[in-house]
Amino acid sequence: MRRSILLLAALAATLAGCGADRRQPPDVVTPQTPKGGQAVRVAPAGVSFTAPANWRVSYGPAPLYATVTSGRATIAIYRYPRVEKLPRTAKQLAAAGSAHAAAGLTRDPTLTELVGVRVRIDGEPGFQTRATEHILGLPRTVRSTHLYAHRGELVIDAFAPAEDFARVDAGAFRPLLRSLRVSRPEGGA
């Protein structure tokens, strides 16, 4: 009997402590400040780059080959094989950028602040846009980079909530683009 009373008292003391410790849950939505670097190679897409060491890298099936994420910030890397002639000249790249902008507005009529520029990354031509659009119903600032190489279009979409964008753009998005190396995809992609 005494043993049962001690067991009940211990159980009551344990249960009384449940919920008493009011710790703040971890913040899983604010992107971490990028730290360090991890080398990432995505051979089927023909890309390699350096991602923040404290961000998560995941791999997926074509056309989405890789994502680099932290909280609500994401860098998504796609590759689309192309049979048509790839844009190379300034005029062709401007037309591709205009078509991309029109498609974006069709997909999301709330798309705003569209800024487009021609780019060359690792010697490959392309264009880049920056806009505020809705992704899964939530407003996000997006830096979308399109490169044309090796019979395909590489798309690197980097997006985050507006309040986090400038910080992760400077610390993660732009450094990843500067580190990007483009090669012939392995495995027929």
Image (cartoon, rainbow, N blue to C red):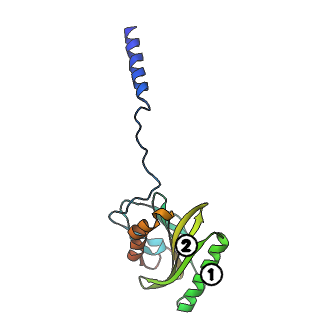
Residue at left 52%, top 70%? 142
Q: Position of residue 64 (x, y in %)?
A: 53, 67
Left or right of 32 in this view: 81: right
Q: Which of marks 1 and 2 is in front?
A: 2
The residue singled out by tag 2 in the image is 131
Residue at left 67%, top 73%? 106
Q: Is mark 1 on a helix, strand or loop?
A: helix
Which is nearer the N-term, disc 1 or disc 2?
1
Residue 86 visible in rendering: no
Residue at left 54%, top 79%? 115
Locate the N terminus and report the quarter of the image it occupies: top left
Q: Residue furthest top?
A: 1
The residue singled out by tag 1 in the image is 99
Seen from the viewer's position, the closer of residues 37 and 159 is: 159
Q: In this view, does 32 lie above or below 182?
A: above
Point out which mark residue 19 bears: none
Seen from the viewer's position, the closer of residues 126 and 64 is: 126
- Give the class, few, some or many, for how many residues have Cα within 10 Å of label 1's Cα (few <14, many ≥20): few
Instruction: Give the Cα separation between the discs numbered 1 and 2.
Output: 15 Å
Q: In this view, does 140 lie above or below 99?
A: above
Q: What element carries label 2?
A: strand
Q: Where is residue 50 in the image (x, y as percent from the top left)?
A: 37, 70
- Give the class, few, some or many, for how many residues have Cα within 10 Å of label 2's Cα (few <14, many ≥20): some
Residue 55 visible in rendering: yes
Q: Position of residue 175 (x, y in %)?
A: 38, 72
Seen from the viewer's position, the closer of residues 69 and 16 is: 16
| Amino acid type, callout 1 | Ala
| Amino acid type, callout 2 | Ala
Residue at left 64%, top 74%? 105
- Quarter of the figure with residue 114: bottom right
Q: Where is residue 123 in the image (x, y as percent from the top left)?
A: 42, 85
